[in-house]
């Protein structure tokens, strides 16, 4: 089945008829349908499927039983952010399947197993912890800690998995892959680019150098609920004002430092039109080129928020919900992958987005990423896009990479 | 049954065990329980109950069948804002029942019927239109238009009423009271004060002069959903920033003009931590001393928001969801009520909050309000409070008023 055909098959799964965006939250219907589609594709290619107890999937290509030992893993994820795009995740999975097809067409026989992986809850859109599947399989987090995670409706992770029947399959393996390095020699994730670096350079494919450090911080602003009509402005302790100034300050600090800071999620209590709020909780996503730069920016924003809270007579606490250190991908591997016989090497560029590749890299697996050009740079949005010609160029680059690594 | 006993009876109904605040949304369990409690109190006093088709209740005291014609109506409401206080609404209902007890103790026989009323959905906390019950009975809005109202879960008004069995009672009357002036000679609503005017004056009771004009406006800020990590700050169209500046501007304009403006309700799409929002919808509650002042403030805020939207590359539309004109209460009636034999008259003061009394006044019914001192001025909050001694002083003032009006 061609790349185009697979892409068309997967396109309607979890797509909103109003926005055109995707809602593929882990262990919910649409995402399970996408996982079932992946298993079908594995069967159609005679890939040997393994499933761990949280739903991470790998379809292994072993040309004959003698081909054992650590394999070359490639893949991505099938879940989406809320109202996300079609490419973030699925492009890496579909390209991996298409790359295997291409290698078989080329008559290539790998000397090592090649696995196509689908990791669960990469976006953290349901349980709040990004790269949950890869964190669990590498031991970066434990199932015991993850058991405490709940979604917005209060559903626990394991209950969500059980409702989806993930653990009832008879041949699931334990999630913390005990022999990770014995199974995985190296990992390559292909991904749509989420910025415009490749557009500016005029090339369809790039290779990752690093992932910026990244943190998610919860800001709790507390005030005094009151009547919106009768309470004099000067008698208020309105946490919405402290929040509003903080959101503007975060934007300004990120611009000044060439970093990123975003308040995209807000929860207001009681959230009534005629009530001064008692509490505003807001989540800041922040990223910078180095951990020092990230910490300095967070400190500036926290200080400015605290000063405003003092003036507003409101309370403020800031909690880091997750912080990921910088990821420096294997430089030698990146250069090997970037090299093209008879042509200029693909550019080696940083990314500001977290990926399962970052988690596997931190677990000591030599890891690389390939990016496919995104004409607008827009992602995590229904407008996320890549040209079909660039996608097919990505499949070729991935097939070339797998040939180099599994020879 | 004494005021104190009634107050204790009603106190647990719909109270949150975590915040101590009240959740008495119309046609939901707690509010229906409060309505059933009221009907019991009417039966215990031999009041003749009438119920219209949306659930507005009146318990009429007719000392004998000859006492007919337009009556003196007093009362308030039993619903609350989300996480509201104990006093806003119930104080007027319980005080009305206690005032009837006091008049009977005094041996007073009214020459006109005296009715105790409970109007539904005064706060607009479920269907978004404040004073819904009194608007319907006065014809300020029609049932045909109200049929379109839905709550946050999409439930239509009539379905909510049917689920609560409001219209299945055999003797409901039509909601638009066709002979309003033949039933109601005048209306008096007792209410906890929602500011500190009486505290500053050092008196327990006041009488209303007017209600400030009041509007609820929906601001829709649209932008471009995008990845919070990879999108350069300068490439964003982030509606959260436009909203944040608007919330601060509204606060500033209200302070400058001695008015009120509050953003207490916000809805963000998609509301994900790692996504620049595609849309922020926020509701502004605004009030001012005159309609001109209200419109001028709205124009200033809208202009500032529009200027910021231009800089942010975001879209903005502003819709008035409801606007209430100024209410000037009957001056003669207020002065009659304020007069106290052998003591200084109660002060006559404005209020910034909407009330059913405002709706009845606009329908041409001579209307008055009594306020009971609130030590902190806090309302629409679990901290809303009035001293018991002041509440009992309020009951006496209301009984005195009813005596004057029903003599």
Image (cartoon, coloured by chain):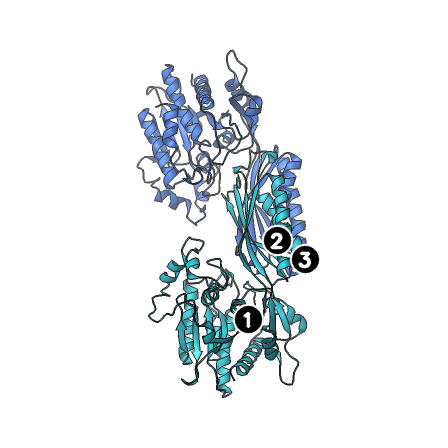
Chain colours: A cyan, B blue
- Of tags 3 and 1, the one toward the viewer is 3
Report whether A272 appears left or right of A345: left
> Measured from the top left, where is residue B45 in percent x and y?
33, 24
Instruction: Specify the quadrant of the image occupied by residue A45.
Output: bottom left
Residue at 53% over, 65% down: A85
Please identify the quarter of the rendering in which residue B79 is found.
Answer: top left
Quick one: label 3, few (<14), some, or many (20+) residues within 10 Å? some
CA–CA distance in space, label 3 to label 2: 11 Å
Identify residue for label 2.
Answer: A298
A383 or A198, which is in the foreground? A198
Q: Measured along the vertical axis of the image, is residue B194 above or below residue A26?
A: above
- Which residue carries the number 3 mark? A257
Q: Are marks 3 and 1 on the same chain?
A: yes
Please name whichever residue, B143 or B305, is drawn nearer the observer in this view of the structure: B305
* Secondary structure category for the residue under label 1: strand
Question: Horizontal and vertical percent for residue B269?
Answer: 53, 55
Label 1 neighbour load within 10 Å: few <14, some 14-19, many 20+? many
Reading the image, the residue beneath label 1 is: A191
Other residues around mark 2 within 10 Å, as few (<14) / some (14–19) / many (≥20): many
Label 1 vs label 2: CA separation? 29 Å
**Letter of the chain that mark 2 sits on in the rendering:** A
Please give the chain letter of the residue carrying mark 3: A
Residue at 45% across, 80% down: A69
Alpha carbon distance from label 3 to label 1: 27 Å
Q: Is residue B75 visible?
A: no
The chain to which mark 1 is attached is A
Residues at marks 1 and 2 on the same chain: yes
């Amino acid at each position: 089945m061609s790349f185009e055909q697979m892409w068309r098959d997967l396109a309607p799964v979890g797509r909103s008829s109003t926005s055109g965006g995707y809602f593929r939250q882990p262990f919910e219907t649409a995402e399970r349908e996408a996982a079932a589609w992946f298993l079908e594709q594995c069967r159609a290619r005679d890939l040997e499927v393994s499933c761990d107890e949280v739903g991470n999937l790998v379809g292994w290509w072993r040309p004959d039983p003698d081909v054992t030992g650590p394999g070359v893993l490639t893949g991505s994820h099938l879940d989406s952010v809320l109202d996300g795009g079609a490419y973030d995740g699925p492009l890496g999975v579909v390209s991996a399947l298409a790359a295997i097809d291409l290698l078989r067409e080329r008559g290539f026989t790998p000397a090592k197993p090649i696995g196509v992986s689908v990791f669960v809850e990469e976006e953290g859109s349901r349980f709040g912890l990004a790269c949950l599947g890869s964190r669990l399989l590498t031991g970066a987090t434990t199932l015991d800690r993850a058991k405490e995670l709940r979604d917005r409706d209060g559903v626990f992770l394991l209950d969500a998995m059980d409702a989806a029947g993930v653990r009832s399959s008879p041949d699931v393996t334990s999630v913390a892959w005990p022999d990770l390095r014995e199974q995985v020699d190296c990992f390559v994730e292909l991904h749509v680019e989420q910025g415009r670096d490749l557009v500016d350079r005029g090339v369809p494919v790039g290779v990752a150098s690093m992932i910026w450090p990244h943190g998610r911080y919860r800001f709790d602003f507390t005030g005094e609920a009151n009547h919106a009509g009768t309470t004099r402005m000067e008698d208020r302790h309105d946490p919405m004002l402290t929040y509003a100034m903080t959101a503007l300050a975060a934007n300004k600090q990120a611009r000044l430092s060439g970093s990123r800071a975003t308040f995209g999620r807000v929860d207001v209590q009681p959230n009534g039109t005629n009530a001064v709020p008692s509490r505003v909780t807001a989540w800041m996503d922040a990223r910078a080129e180095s951990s020092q730069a990230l910490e300095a920016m967070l400190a500036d924003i926290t200080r400015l928020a605290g000063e405003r809270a003092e003036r507003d007579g409101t309370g403020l606490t800031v909690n880091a919900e997750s912080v990921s250190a910088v990821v420096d991908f294997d430089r030698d591997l990146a250069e090997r992958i970037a090299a093209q016989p008879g042509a200029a090497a693909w550019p080696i560029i940083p990314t500001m987005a977290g990926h399962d590749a970052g988690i596997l890299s931190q677990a000591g697996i030599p890891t690389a990423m390939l990016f496919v050009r995104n004409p607008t740079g827009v992602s995590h949005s229904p407008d996320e896009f890549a040209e079909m010609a660039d996608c097919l160029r990505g499949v070729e680059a991935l097939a070339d990479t797998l040939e180099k690594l599994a020879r």
